Image: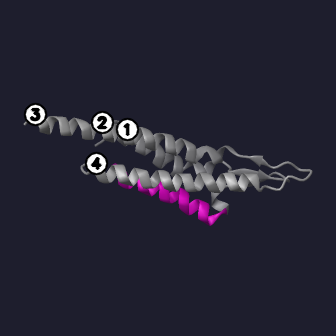
Amino acid sequence: MIQRIQTLYLAVVALCSGILPFVVSLWTLSGDVQISAKDNLSVLATFLGVAVLAIIAIFLFKKRQHQFVLNRLNMILNLFLLGFFVYRSLNLSGGTAVSEKGIGMLIPVFSIVFLVLANRAIKKDEDLVKSVDRLR
């Protein structure tokens, strides 16, 4: 389980989505008011959902097809979160005081990249197992 590279990728996703939203800000409003995931319950629940799905996928190492599907669902959840951030960043009030986007808005992008890498590694493992089964 731990020696597989997809476990490392999924652990990075779990750490990024489980810890980073509490550390970095998502965006900064005028007057230096920083908004983090703790301030928005739905965003916090989505980040924690992504982290939990990644942890569950780590422990499904014996069922590669279920792990693959769970990672796809995790990618969809990250795309939903990314879409919310894009919508929110386009609707931030401009006015005279310019609001800034925080680095926390990129967490779903990093998660999607690592989930794609994990799915590639899972597919490679599945192909290897199928090729060995053919030889028997």
Disc 1 target residue? 120
Q: Please identify the residue farthest to the front as the structure is shown.
A: 134
Disc 3 target residue? 135
Q: Nearer the viewer, mark 4 or mark 3?
A: 3
Say which label, 3 or 1, has the lower sequence index. 1
- Give how far apart the Cα atoms at labels 4 and 3 are: 20 Å
Residue in the picture at 58% in, 60% down: 44
Q: Nearer the viewer, mark 3 or mark 1?
A: 3
Residue 83 location (% of width, % of height): 62, 54
Q: Amino acid at mark 4?
A: Arg
- Residue 59 in view (yes/no): no
Residue contact between numbered discs 2 and 1, judged by CB atoms under 8 Å? yes
Q: Amino acid at mark 1?
A: Arg
Residue 124 bears which disc, if any? 2
- Give how far apart the Cα atoms at labels 4 and 2 are: 10 Å
**Is 56 placed above or below 123 here?**
below
Nearest the eye: 130 or 26: 130
Disc 4 target residue? 64
Q: Badge 3: how crowded within 10 Å, few (<14), some, or many (20+)?
A: few
Q: Amino acid at mark 3?
A: Leu
Residue in the picture at 39% in, 41% down: 118
- Give how far apart the Cα atoms at labels 3 and 1 are: 23 Å
Residue contact between numbered discs 4 and 1, judged by CB atoms under 8 Å? no
